[in-house]
Image (spheres, helix red, strand yellow):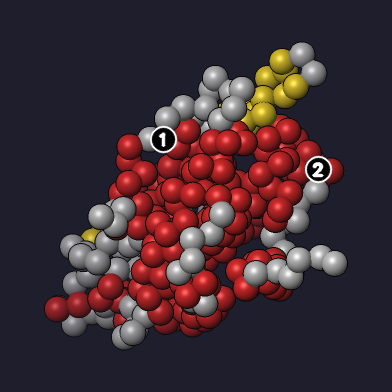
Amino acid sequence: MANPQSPLDRFLSRLLKSDPPRAKSLCVSLLGDALAPHGGAIWLGDLIALLAPLGINERLLRTSVFRLVAQNWLQSERHGRRSLYLISEQGLRHTAHASQRIYEGAAQDWNGEWTLVALPRTGNGLAERAELRRELVWEGFGMIAPGLFAHPHTEARAAHDILEKLGIPDRALVLSARDLAGAGGLPIASLASQCWNLDDVAEQYRQFSRNFGPLEKLLEEAPSPSEAFVIRVMLLHNWRRIVLHDPQLPGPMLPDNWPGHAARELCGRIYWKVFDASEAHLEALAGQDNERFGALAGDIAARFGGRPA
């Protein structure tokens, strides 16, 4: 007779069944959160073993890894019959850029400065304009008028990087601006609900809290290292999918009782509760027979406002 599942096992099974993760996206979450802080190198067999408990089979994972290599997220090395995968320089840049949004969030103070991207009426085809709009919205910009995008936090460098990536560095204006609402103008911040889909983001944060809130009580009894690792990966994967779509507007522009604040606090508490045990599991699988697996980077202790004492 099979042993009955523990309440924690049942919870994790329900969560995985209700929202099965995609292999490639889950792999990126794991690379950024757990592997990059150790140097970013892992044997393919160990990667397969780490993600198997999350419902990712070997075939799907191999396909995802090959695609990440083709997109220059990963690089591969052959060692006899084994394959070692390493996060590329481009992958590390993407990871570092996303980490600020994932672990720190938007700064609550704001100096009133805006970064604007303006598209001239001529010089850009429809396809280029559509692709640029998609990239700017992903970065958190809102369209405040046709061909004019704004963000209160994102530095101009991020906008220039997007233009470089699309091969159109000289086809848009990148400006720094400040509201002159005191002179009778309309403040950009008053357009927040029209230019950014805050209602949808807010509901995603509420759903995150509903999904993961019950974990706090279940974690009163320490999970095993393997359970802790599954929790950490699922937690960060779900959190990452939300915050990378959040425009991360400064506090004064957000509605009262913004659910993102409570969701971030919940995520941080659970993350640190399972961190040490999850690291033990990671090292037991990925750290053995892997000279490229380094000591944990010191700056990890600053995630989610700092490791609790």
Q: Is residue 220 visible?
A: yes
Q: Residue furthest top?
A: 80
Q: Is residue 197 left or right of residue 306?
A: right
Residue at the (21%, 64%) spot, across then down = 110
Q: Secondary structure at mark 2?
A: helix
Q: Residue furthest left?
A: 182
Q: How many marks?
A: 2
Q: Residue furthest bottom?
A: 256
Residue at the (59%, 23%) spot, across then down = 290
Q: Secondary structure at mark 1?
A: loop
Q: Residue flagged by tag 2: what amino acid is it?
A: Glu
Residue 6's place in the image compared with 31, above or below, is below
Point out residue 202 in the picture as x, y percentages from the top left corner: 47, 79
Question: Looking at this view, is 246 or 168 the one in front?
Answer: 246
| Mark closest to the chain's N terminus, 1 or 2 | 2
Residue 176's place in the image compared with 42, above or below, is below
Q: Which residue is mark 2?
A: 58
Q: Residue furthest front?
A: 1
In three-dimensional space, the C-alpha distance between marks 1 and 2, rounded to whole angstroms, equals 27 Å
Question: Looking at this view, is 242 or 123 the one in front?
Answer: 242
Is the N terminus in the top left, top right, bottom left or bottom right quadrant? bottom right
Point out residue 129 in the picture as x, y percentages from the top left corner: 58, 56
Residue at the (58%, 36%) spot, across then down = 284
Point out residue 307 in the picture as x, y percentages from the top left corner: 31, 53
Is the C terminus in the top left, top right, bottom left or bottom right quadrant? bottom left
Count residues near mark 2 (Cα–Cα under 10 Å), then give few for <14, some for 14-19, many for 20+: some
Q: Which residue is mark 1?
A: 296
Point out residue 267 in the picture as x, y percentages from the top left corner: 44, 65
